Amino acid sequence: MVKVNSFNKIEKIIDTADKHLIIGAGFVGLGMAQALKAADIPYDQVDASDNIGGNWYHGVYETAHIISSRKITQFTHFPMPDNYPDFPSAQNMRDYLNAFCDRFDLRENIELNRTISYAQPVENNLWEVTFADGEQRIYKGVLICNGHHWNKRFPKFQGKFNGEIIHSKDYKRPNQLVGKRVLVIGGGNSACDLAAEAARVGAKCVLSMRESVWFIPKSFAGFPVADLMKWWMPQWFQRLMAYAIIRLSFGTHKDYGLSQPNHRVFDKHPTLNNEVPYYIKHGRIIPKPAVRKLDGWEVEFVDGSREAFDLIVCATGYHVAYPFLPPELQRIEGAVVKCYGGSFFDDYKGLYFIGWGQARGGVGSLIAAFGSLFTRYLKLQDKINVPIGLVLKEIGQKLPQSHLADPQQIFRQLKLANFLFDWLVKKAHQVDAQHPHFHNQPLPPLQSIQHQPLVR
């Protein structure tokens, strides 16, 4: 396949139209690659980094451990080694993902150091992918598994700070904190991990939270808390269990000089941490409300108090972002990607968003359960003209309203979807018959890339 550019030069476009492209070789990307391979669906896989593992390779600090348990984090069809602890380390996770990759011979399809600059729908319901080095390929579809722990979100500060300000993603090892007066901003898992680290090795640690969070212990009565939640439990029952565990483990927020959270457990991403309450009781972590302004070496908080610091660590999360997609396909509201079934558009086929949501835990078991269903969707997509997303919309599915998800509810939904899949196939053909002339609307390329019609 060739194209003619505006300077009448003949350039090649690599024709891989019988394949799908998986973007990302982290936990989600590798899980989806294994699912496609098991279903004999041809694919290529690319990652912008120089090794596999995603955030576990390039993003986490060296002392990180998972917050959910080994049992629910592992792929169900590839258990972690028996000698792994209940909460494996970052190195354990890297070793595990490399072992998974080797066990299922996934490396042969992975291209590293490949950054995508643009992916656009073109004629014949295909997708043209342009790489940073200028190479272009044509694919049947694109699975976006690029993760959501890379586009750093910083708070907006008033005033100036004389010390250093970093994002939690820039924190890698404890010597960045040794002997320093540290302010950690945030109430999530990374914030609390870093605050505990600063409590151990820093001269001072203050944890600034706009509002109190529910601290859930990582284990209770010798068992990881995540393992106590079962697929059959409705969320109200899980919430009741969590309240009881919190009360028995930590007492009340008042006991730590903290205000009561203004949200229910699980209405926001849970913070699983035993150490912050411990270090608050030891005076090694000082809780403070939100920052009002920066003033030289000092920070003023909204309660009027002031503290001096050498380092501010912003554990303030990430933006969900797909910078390689055209504006017409940027359908993100806050942290929510507006797609049916968590992955599908209703007006474009061949573009799939995977892993953008935040379940409370169990990425490996969730991807293992979702991967086999997703490949059934892909094979169904080959038999119908309309997008799978339109089928899901027509049978009554709604667009997501939150990026948070109860993993147990997801498991129940996946079980139901597999059970009803034959019925879904019939509905899909009925919807397809109602839209006999459907096709993806081709979108223009980036202005910096001169595209002309394809010549076959």
Image: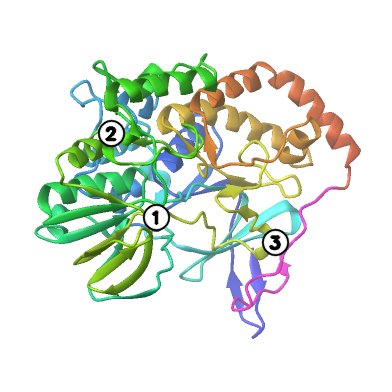
Give the side of residue 353 with respect to residue 98, left or right: right
Q: Earlier in the sequence, mark 2 or mark 3?
A: 2
Query: What residue appears at the point 68 percent right and 39 percent down from the top-left corner?
Result: 340
Q: Amino acid at mark 1?
A: Thr
Residue 393 in picture, x, y percent from top left:
76, 37
Q: Secondary structure at mark 2?
A: helix
Which is nearer the eye, 416 or 47?
A: 416
Mark nearest the camera among 3 and 1 is 1
**Residue identified by numbered label 3:** 328
Is 440 located above or below residue 436 in the figure?
below
Q: Are marks 1 and 2 in contact (CB under 8 Å)?
A: no
Q: Which mark is residue 407?
A: none
Query: What residue appears at the point 36 percent right and 53 percent down from the top-left corner?
Result: 289
Q: Amino acid at mark 2?
A: Asp
What span is in magenta?
438-456
Q: Earlier in the sequence, mark 3 or mark 1?
A: 1
Magenta region includes residue 448: yes
Magenta region includes residue 443: yes
Q: Earlier in the sequence, mark 1 or mark 2?
A: 2
Distance of mark 1 from mark 2, alpha carbons?
A: 26 Å
Q: Amino acid at mark 3?
A: Glu
Q: Residues within 10 Å of mark 3 (few under 14, many from 20)?
A: few
Q: Which mark is residue 255?
A: 2
Residue 374 in picture, x, y percent from top left:
59, 32
Q: Secondary structure at mark 1?
A: loop
Would residue 2 be visible to someone looking at this image? yes
**Residue identified by numbered label 1:** 316
Distance of mark 3 from mark 1, alpha carbons?
A: 28 Å
Q: Residues within 10 Å of mark 2 (few under 14, many from 20)?
A: few
Distance of mark 2 from mark 3, alpha carbons?
A: 51 Å
Q: Secondary structure at mark 3?
A: helix
Q: Main secondary structure of the magenta part?
A: loop
